[in-house]
Amino acid sequence: MVVLPVPGALCRECRLCCHFTEPGVLTPWAARPEEGESLPAPFRPPSPIGLRPGLGRMDLPVLVCDALRPERDRCGVWGEHPADCRLYPLVLVHRDGGFLLALDPDCPFALRETPAFFRDFAERFREEEWARITPEEADRIRTLARGEDRPHYRAILPLPEPERSRLA
Ligand code: SF4
Ligand code: SF4
């Protein structure tokens, strides 16, 4: 299981993650009501998660992942949290006809490390987790990944299309 080593102190200062301004922007796919059980295993948490109203930075109203434990400001399913959380600031997008891991430069951690650093983790995800995704599962997340892309995200590693013939 690949987890980007974002320092806890940096996240506690930043507090952008796990708090969202829109239900469909960078929210874990598993927290979107219409997705649920249909997601591939790496993107499914051990128990269902959702979004609830809460407060973000400067007490602005936001949506908060209900797996977040506010008393400790920690993820309640840490270690088994979904791949889209574990990989961030890498984001799985679908661009120019293919899947791609891209870097969101809005995360302060994205600016602290080199592209090679993020490429290493992206390659590990490709080998350890993406390699188990079936063509049918890839089809189920294609639209989600397309909607995740933003023009300022930097391409890090293209991911191969799972081969239908491999499993036939
Ligand atoms: S945006 Fe980056 S630094 Fe901020 S909370 Fe998320 S992972 Fe941590
Ligand atoms: S599952 Fe955990 S890491 Fe992911 S948004 Fe929820 S609280 Fe944050």
Image (cartoon, rainbow, N blue to C red):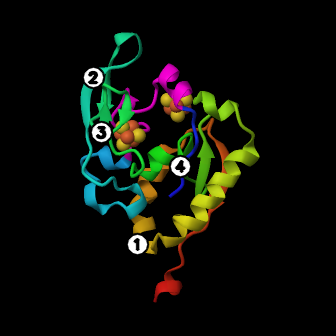
Secondary structure type for disc 1: helix
At 73% across and 44% down in the image, what residue appears? 115
Residue at horizontal 24 percent and vertical 50 percent from the top: 48
Q: Position of residue 107 (x, y in %)?
A: 58, 30
Q: Please identify, in this view, whether the residue under mark 1 or under mark 4 is nearer the observer.
A: 4
Q: Amino acid at mark 4?
A: Val
Give whichever of discs 2 and 4 has the lower sequence position. 4
**Viewer-nearest residue: 103 or 11:** 11
Q: Check disc 1 and report the residue beneath it.
A: 136
Q: Residues within 10 Å of mark 3 (few under 14, many from 20)?
A: many
Give the amino acid type for the residue marked by disc 3 in the picture: Ala
Residue 97 visible, this orientation: no
Residue type (three-letter) at the residue carrying disc 1: Glu
Q: Magenta span covers which residues?
A: 8-28
Residue drawn at (54%, 70%) of the image: 131
Give percent across and percent down for residue 118. Answer: 67, 47
1 and 3 marks in contact (CB < 8 Å): no
Per the image, the residue denoted by label 2 is: 54
User: In the displayed structure, would residue 32 be above or below residue 64?
Assistant: below
